Amino acid sequence: MSIQENIHNYYEKLVADTLAELQRQAPRDAEEIEDIACVALNRLPPRYFRHEIDMAFYLSPTEQQEMKDKVDDAIAEAITYVEKSLRDKG
């Protein structure tokens, strides 16, 4: 048994789900999506759990919405940051 296999950051799931939805709306290449995910996650606090059902059970609807809002803001900022970096390289 490994800690890495059993402990997860809930924000990673939220970021991945949000980016998957954005990909359906406006596709980007995989490298750009990975950069956006990293930048967004570095702007969010960690929220660790062992079992996803624990997070769903213990979070109030208000906390869930606050986390979703934080993810949306972090991703928007990350997209701006990554796009600017790509323009500066190009």
Image: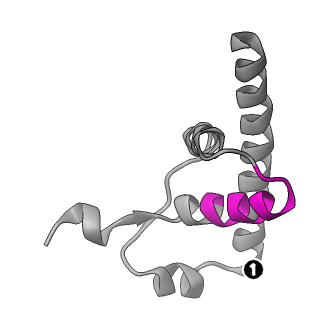
Residue visible at 50% across and 60% down? 47
Question: Mark 1 is on which residue type?
Answer: Pro
Q: Quadrant of residue 90?
A: top right
Q: Where is residue 21 in the image (x, y as percent from the top left)?
A: 76, 65
Residue visible at 56% across and 88% down? 57
Count all numbered tags in the image, as a single digit: 1
Residue visible at 70% across and 19% down? 85
Can residue 67 be seen in the rendering of this structure?
A: no
Q: Position of residue 56 (x, y in %)?
A: 58, 83
The N terminus: image quadrant: bottom left
Seen from the viewer's position, the closer of residues 49 and 77 is 77
- The residue at the far right in this view is 25
Residue at mark 1: 61
- The residue at the far left in this view is 1
Residue 25 within the segment the image draws in magenta: yes
Q: Quadrant of residue 88?
A: top right
Q: Is residue 82 left or right of residue 6?
A: right
Q: In this view, does 51 lie to the left or right of 5?
A: right
Residue 84, above or below 58:
above
Count residues near mark 1 (Cα–Cα under 10 Å), then give few for <14, some for 14-19, many for 20+. Answer: few
Q: Where is residue 87 in the image (x, y as percent from the top left)?
A: 78, 17
Seen from the viewer's position, the closer of residues 8 and 46 is 8
Residue visible at 84% across and 53% down? 26
Q: Where is residue 6 in the image (x, y as percent from the top left)?
A: 29, 72
Q: Is residue 58 left or right of residue 40?
A: left
Q: Which colour scheme is used?
A: one colour
Can residue 30 be seen in the rendering of this structure?
A: yes
Residue 55 within the segment the image draws in magenta: no
Magenta stretch, main secondary structure class = helix
Residue 69, above or below 81:
below
Which region shows up in magenta?
15-27
Under circle 1, the secondary element is helix
